[in-house]
Amino acid sequence: MTRRSVTWILCIAAIALACGPHARHGDGDAHASVPSEHQPAGVSDGTLATSAKVAVANTGSDVNFALQVTNVADHAVEVNFPNGQTHEFVVLDTLGREVWRWSTGRMFTQALQNREVDANETLSFREKWNPHGKRGHYTALAVLRSSNHPIQERVDFVLP
């Protein structure tokens, strides 16, 4: 085989891998319409319990997001991430349109990473958003971007 043939075969293989099936993040079912703060909880697969929280400042100037993932198993659990992004927070309006995404404009390493979560240990992810005067009802998506334990929680909230 010539060098050119090998290059073409590698390019085709890379395209096939890129276009192949991808892991999907689970859809959280927990909803609540609470103006300032709410914390739904769920269990992903019997090993990780999750809770997502949204706290809106009284003035509506800041929105704080939190995602907590707790290992409820009696043994350590390995959580794998396909790159440097471990979590995501997204805000949707009442029509389901994306209003804000935490990762927009951020760069992440392209290296795989694994985290071992001991029994009863909690991973916490917190981020802040300034809605710049927006008002109304919104939904926050809190996502654990794990390839082996994908988790997504939804929390409805109101900006006064």
Image (cartoon, helix red, strand yellow):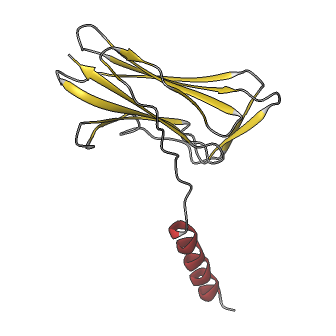
> Residue 112, relative to residue 143: is it above or below?
below
Question: Residue 114, position in %: x, y?
Answer: 70, 40
Could you tell me which residue is drawn at 53 percent across and 66 percent down?
Answer: 18
Q: Quadrant of the N terminus?
A: bottom right
**Is 29 left or right of 7, judged from the image as shown?**
left
Question: Residue 12, position in %: x, y?
Answer: 55, 79
Q: How many marks?
A: 0
Question: Observer-nearest residue: 148 or 36?
Answer: 36
> Residue 80, relative to residue 6: is it above or below?
above
**Is 124 left or right of 31, judged from the image as shown?**
right
Question: Observer-nearest residue: 17 or 97?
Answer: 97
Could you tell me which residue is drawn at 36 percent across and 39 percent down?
Answer: 105
Question: Residue 16, position in %: x, y?
Answer: 55, 74
Could you tell me which residue is drawn at 66 percent across and 22 percent down?
Answer: 122
Question: Observer-nearest residue: 45 or 56?
Answer: 45
Farthest bottom residue?
1
Question: Residue 129, position in %: x, y?
Answer: 33, 23
Farthest top residue?
58
Q: Quadrant of residue 4?
A: bottom right
Q: Quadrant of the C terminus?
A: top left
Farthest right residue?
75
Could you tell me which residue is drawn at 51 percent across and 41 percent down?
Answer: 108
